Image (cartoon, rainbow, N blue to C red):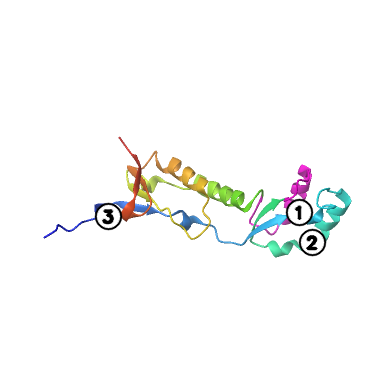
Amino acid sequence: MAEEIVNRVANNKNLITFDLEDYYPNGNRVLFDIKDWLFEGLLLREKDFRKQVSEHDWSQYKDAYVALTCSTDAIIPGWAYLLLTSSLFPFAKKVVVGSLETLETILYVEILNNLDVSEYQNKLIIIKGCTNKPVPEGAYIDLIQKLQPVAKSIMYGEACSAVPLYKKK
């Protein structure tokens, strides 16, 4: 009779699964492309741009995370993004310049910078790899750097098929 295969990792009560998806900040994500506010999609005319800003309904971004971008090859003066941010500030939770991926990365950097990892002192940790939400790759890099100084060991994946990453010597 064959011996039963036991997954000791999955059955380990000292094992903590760390799921970055649990830290995903709720809220609408908006990519705000200013190309439509440019003359022929390429030239920012200050007077016209300021008019667009003053007439736009900024309240629609209430509690949203906004990434400001320009999808054309236009040269955008720095003050333009500042003006947009000033208008978004009373409504949006966060405003960044870049893509939605840049936005997610910045959100996770802030979250992980403020994360208290003392509860993970000398613990066995699995960083869960599969998520349903857009967790950026950089968040995993930041997380292991945050956990490694305190953890006993760190693995990646699921308890049934975890990949070892670090073990304290």
Left or right of residue 67: residue 5: left
What label sits on residue 153 in the rendered view?
Answer: none
Q: Which of pointers 1 and 3 indicates the residue nearer the eye?
A: 1
Residue neighbourhood size for the residue with mark 1, other residues' Cα within 10 Å, grouped as few (<14), some (14–19), many (≥20): many
Q: Which mark is residue 56?
A: 2
Q: Amino acid at mark 3?
A: Lys
Considering the numbered disc 2 on the image, is that residue within a helix, a strand or a loop? loop
At label 1, which amino acid type do we have? Answer: Ile
Pointer 3: what residue?
Answer: 13
Q: Nearer the viewer, residue 38 or 56?
A: 38
Marks 3 and 2 sit apart, C-alpha to C-alpha, by 55 Å
As helix, strand or loop, the secondary structure at mark 1 comes to helix
The C terminus is located in which quarter? Answer: top left
In the image as oriented, which residue stretches furthest toward the front? 1
Q: Residue drawn at (28%, 55%), measured in percent from left and top?
A: 10
**Label 3's element?**
loop
Residue 44 in magenta stretch = no
Measured in 3D between alpha carbons, the distance from the residue under mark 1 to the one under mark 3, in whole angstroms, is 52 Å
Q: Which residue is mark 1?
A: 34
> Which residue is rendered at x = 24% and y = 53% of the image?
8
Q: Nearer the viewer, residue 122 or 47?
A: 47
- Is residue 114 in view? no
Residue 85 colored magenta? yes
